[in-house]
Image (cartoon, rainbow, N blue to C red):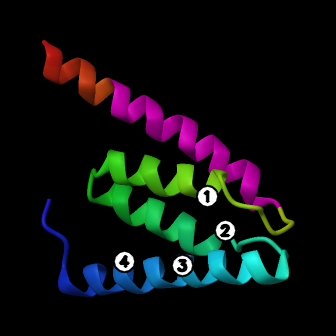
Amino acid sequence: MKLEPDTLSEIRNLLELVEKEEAEDKIYKWGVAPAPYERLAILYRKDKNYFAEVAILERYVKQHHAPGVKPPRLLERLDKAKKLVASKAVRYQK
């Protein structure tokens, strides 16, 4: 699927925000906010780019998390995304 220019711009902005969050966490140790990771995962899933979805969620898992209810939800989403990647791999092997 080809992404719209607005979506590509949003992805670039979100990736910059992820970099900023991670850099700030190294200084202040308050944890990264889950929102940009979650939004990126949603955009990648809409594009059927399950590998990118898994990659951004795995990147989130490696970070110190800010408190809240989203971290467990994103871990569940990662499990589902990994299953989608595995199902795609099985289809290509047939």
Q: Position of residue 90 (x, y in %)?
A: 25, 18
Query: Which circle's residue, 2 or 3, is located before the other in the chain?
Result: 3
Q: Name the residue under label 1.
A: 60
Q: Could you say whether the residue bearing mark 3 is in a helix, strand or loop?
A: helix
Q: Nearer the viewer, residue 29 or 40?
A: 29
Q: Mark 4 points at which residue?
A: 11
Q: Could you say whether the residue bearing mark 1 is in a helix, strand or loop?
A: helix
Determine the CA span between mark 2 and mark 3: 13 Å
Query: Which circle's residue, 4 or 2, is located before the other in the chain?
Result: 4
The residue under label 3 is which amino acid type?
Glu
Q: Position of residue 85 (x, y in %)?
A: 35, 34
In the image, is 72 to the left or to the right of 13?
right
Segment tinted magenta in the rendering: 69-86
The residue under label 4 is which amino acid type?
Ile
In the image, is 70 to the left or to the right of 85?
right
Q: Residues within 10 Å of mark 3 (few under 14, many from 20)?
A: few
Is there a contact, CB below 8 Å, between mark 1 and mark 4? Answer: no
| Residue 62 colored in magenta in the image | no
Using the image, tell me which numbered label, if any, was put on residue 19. Answer: 3
Using the image, tell me which numbered label, if any, was put on residue 34. Answer: 2
Q: Could you say whether the residue bearing mark 2 is in a helix, strand or loop?
A: loop
Determine the CA span between mark 1 and mark 4: 15 Å
Query: Which circle's residue, 1 or 4, is located before the other in the chain?
Result: 4
